[in-house]
Image (cartoon, grey):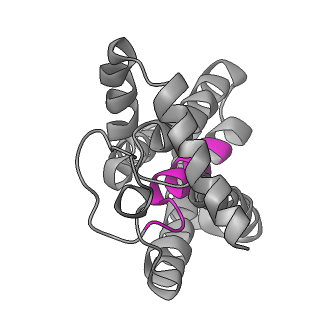
Amino acid sequence: MNWFLTLDGNILLWIQEYVRKDRLDQVVTFITNLGNAGWFWLVLSVLLLFFVKYRKTGLTSLVAILIGFVITNLLLKNIVNRIRPYEVVEGLRFIGKMPHDASFPSGHSTCSMAASVVLLKKLPKKAGIPLFVLGILICLSRLYVGVHYPTDVLMGAAVGIVSAFAAIRIMRTSDVDKILP
């Protein structure tokens, strides 16, 4: 198991050495900040509530985000309580704001995948695909800025995807159409 943790840290050092470029730092920081507290996905989901055609999609996205938040931020982060990589991996420097919660799993990845998978499935492809790509970019940005291990991001993305499909199923089997105008 120790080799696995070493590999996790070495991947981040490789990214820092070979992928990070000064000219990319601002772009990637902007992308990662879209995931801060899930604000981008929450605002987008709420905006969809104002359009009758996409109201159920917006609500489904909010349900997915909520499921992911409960699993990631209220349960797993507190149970696992993994230390951030920049505190442990010698030579790793983070970019941007210092997070103050546990590392595992990535909340940015959970929220981004929860919302973007719902939007990919429920919106027209010309909107759903770019939003899904943005979700993936936010996940990858967490590695670039050095605040999450690859396993944090993978688990966060997995929780987000499961949350999206759970929300889609919940909304499909509920009587939500009766309460939505």
Closer-to-camera residue (52/20):
20
Q: In the rendered view, tell whether residue 42 sits above or below residue 32.
A: below
Name the spot of residue 149 as percent of width and height, x first.
Answer: 54, 55
Q: Which residue lies furthest to the top in this view?
A: 23
Q: In the rendered view, tell whether residue 65 sits above or below residue 135.
A: below
The residue under the point 59% across, 60% down is 156
Name the side, left or right, on which 68 lies relative to 118: left
The residue under the point 70% across, 56% down is 161
Residue 64 falls within the magenta-colored stretch: no
Viewer can see residue 131: yes
Closer-to-camera residue (178/143):
143
The residue under the point 59% across, 48% down is 10
Q: Quadrant of residue 146?
A: top left
Name the spot of residue 5 as percent of width and height, x first.
Answer: 63, 64
Magenta residues, start to end: 103-117
Q: In which quarter of the image is residue 44?
A: top left
Q: Which residue lies furthest to the front in this view?
A: 90
Name the spot of residue 57 as percent of width and height, x first.
Answer: 59, 47
Viewer can see residue 52: no
Q: Which residue lies furthest to the left in this view?
A: 97
Q: Quadrant of residue 41?
A: top left
Closer-to-camera residue (84/66):
84
Name the side, left or right, on which 140 lies relative to 77: right
Counting every numbered tag in the picture gives 0
The residue under the point 33% across, 17% down is 22
Q: In the rendered view, tell whether residue 6 sits above or below residue 57.
A: below
Name the side, left or right, on which 25 lies relative to 152: left
